[in-house]
Amino acid sequence: MKGLSHHVVKEFCALCDWAYHANQIHRHLFDNNPHADKLRRTDYGCALAQLSSVTVEYAALQIAKLHDKAVVAGNVTLSIDYVMTYGGWEDAAKSLLVPIRAKLDSFAEKLRHARNKALSHNDLAAIVSGGVLGTFEENEDLEYFQNLEKFADVVSREVTGEGFTYSAEIVMTASGLVRIVNTLAASLDA
């Protein structure tokens, strides 16, 4: 017997999808945009730098929230830990989920300090020191989201009988945003 309802699993998968969307918007606008460097050198550079900070921090926060403990300060959270703790997993499913979770947690650990000191709280010591609070290797986030998709797929298949993939909606959203930014870049060339 599964410990999670169809509704809870659908909501968990929606949170995974949302974290992916947040990450992809940043990547498409800034990391993968061939016009990003040119745009940074324009009058819009400061505004775009702020937008870049907002999108990267928001994406990191969405990842970090997926890695909250199942219960925080007496409140139940819908997180990977909740799914694992209360999923009622049979051995076959658990043997698939545990190693994927380990990979996911390893990546999220790199963001934990930033989440605790800057993204969720304005930690005075962290602000005054001004140091870097969380980093990861280039494209390591892509691997994280591949693993998150696998994790959510196993969870969804086991509970609902349906697979999980990230929604294609993000491609249209990110493409539209990139078109706007690149139209701006093209107008600077004119």
Image (cartoon, rainbow, N blue to C red):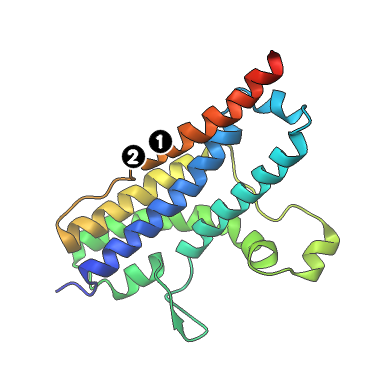
Residue 51 sits above or below residue 10 on the image: above
Q: Residues within 10 Å of mark 1 (few under 14, many from 20)?
A: some
Q: Are marks 1 and 2 in contact (CB under 8 Å)?
A: yes
123 or 180, nearer to the observer: 180
Q: Name the residue at 34% across, 45% down.
A: 166
Q: Would residue 94 be found to the left or right of residue 170 on screen?
A: left
- Image coordinates of residue 177 in percent, x first then y, are 52, 35
Q: Quadrant of residue 122?
A: bottom right
Residue 38 sits above or below residue 134 on the image: above
In this view, which residue lies farthest toward the top?
Answer: 190
Q: Quadrant of residue 160?
A: bottom left
* Residue pointed to by mark 1: 171
Disc count in the image?
A: 2
Q: Would residue 159 be found to the left or right of residue 29 on screen?
A: left
* Residue pointed to by mark 2: 168
In this view, which residue lies farthest toward the right?
Answer: 128
Q: Name the residue at 45% across, 47% down.
A: 21
> Which type of secondary structure does the marked residue at label 2 adopt?
loop
103 or 6, nearer to the observer: 6
Quarter of the picture holding the N terminus: bottom left
- Image coordinates of residue 75 in percent, x first then y, are 46, 82
Residue 42 sits above or below residue 101 on the image: above
Q: Identity of the amino acid at label 1?
A: Val
Q: CA distance from mark 1 to mark 2?
A: 6 Å
Q: Residues within 10 Å of mark 2 (few under 14, many from 20)?
A: few
Q: Quadrant of residue 129?
A: bottom right
Residue 189 sits above or below residue 33 on the image: above
Quarter of the picture holding the C terminus: top right
- Image coordinates of residue 73 in percent, x first then y, are 52, 84
Q: Identity of the amino acid at label 2?
A: Ala
